[in-house]
Amino acid sequence: MGPVSAQIAIDAPRERVYELLLDLSARPAFTDHLLRRYHLLRVDPVGVGAGARFYLPEAGGWFDSVIEEVEPPYRIIERGRGGRFNRVPCLLEWRLTEIPGPAGCEVTVTFWTQPEHPVDRVLELRRSQRRLAKGWREVLQRLRQLVEEERPVERLEVAGASRLGL
């Protein structure tokens, strides 16, 4: 699936938005309508190496995503695999740019998959990029609402983390 992008202006400091995006335990607060059955892959859900597994029906099933690159406070790149037999590479990129004004930024999210197997390419033709793009636009609207209203974010934890004393 070619790149599916969405962007939105948020009236909040870029650093605050960046910190929220970098913490994978906060993602379900604004992505739970699109990324279903979201699970963390490690105890520390922040920064490079943090990962999550989620179900994304609009893109073909289960996906794993791990934060691979960060450029504070401008960009976060996540790479992973998903789809049939977890063999479809995917990329998720978050870009934050400052906009004119006292405090604000523009957030752009881009998601794409690159099926290599012929069966995966055929299955991808049946998927709706329009529905996926609409889902990402809603993610950004919910993120804007969460950040601008400064609502508390309920964070997800790894099962059993409390027993580890962390």
Image (cartoon, rainbow, N blue to C red):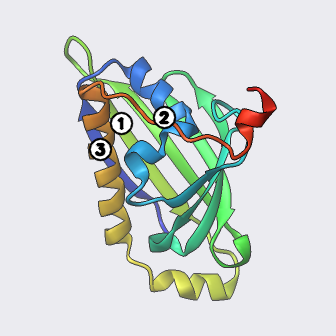
> Residue beneath label 2, please?
21
Check disc 3 and report the residue beneath it: 142
Please tell me whether mark 3 sits on a helix, a strand or a loop: helix
Left or right of 70: which side holds 136?
left
Image-based side of 42 in relation to 105, left or right: right
Q: CA distance from mark 2 to mark 3?
A: 13 Å
Query: Around disc 1, counting alpha carbons within 10 Å, would you say few (fewer than 14), some (14 to 19), or many (20 or more)?
Result: many
The residue type indicated by label 2 comes to Leu
Q: In this view of the protein, can residue 142 be seen by the observer? A: yes
Which picture quadrant has residue 102? top left
Q: Are marks 2 and 3 in contact (CB under 8 Å)?
A: no
Going from the N terminus, do you reach mark 2 or mark 3 first?
2
Which amino acid type is marked by label 1? Val
Q: Quadrant of residue 71?
A: top right
Query: Quick check: marks 1 and 2 in contact, CB under 8 Å?
Result: yes
| Alpha carbons under labels 1 and 2: distance apart | 10 Å
Instruction: Tell me what residue is drawn at x 30 percent, y 34 percent.
Output: 146
Gap between marks 3 and 1 measured at Cα: 12 Å
In the current view of this chain or complex, which residue is farthest to the left? 101
**Spot occupied by residue 88 in the image (x, y as percentages of width and height):** 66, 70
Is residue 49 in sight in this rendering? no
Q: Position of residue 148 (x, y in %)?
A: 25, 27
Farthest front residue in view: 163
The one of 92 and 165 positioned closer to us in this rendering = 165
**Secondary structure category for the residue under label 1:** strand
The residue singled out by tag 1 in the image is: 107
Q: Nearer the viewer, mark 1 or mark 2?
A: 2
Q: Residue at the location (68% across, 39% down)?
A: 50
Q: Using the image, determine if residue 152 lies above or below residue 79.
A: above
CB under 8 Å between discs 3 and 1: no
Is residue 162 positioned above or below 51 on the image? above
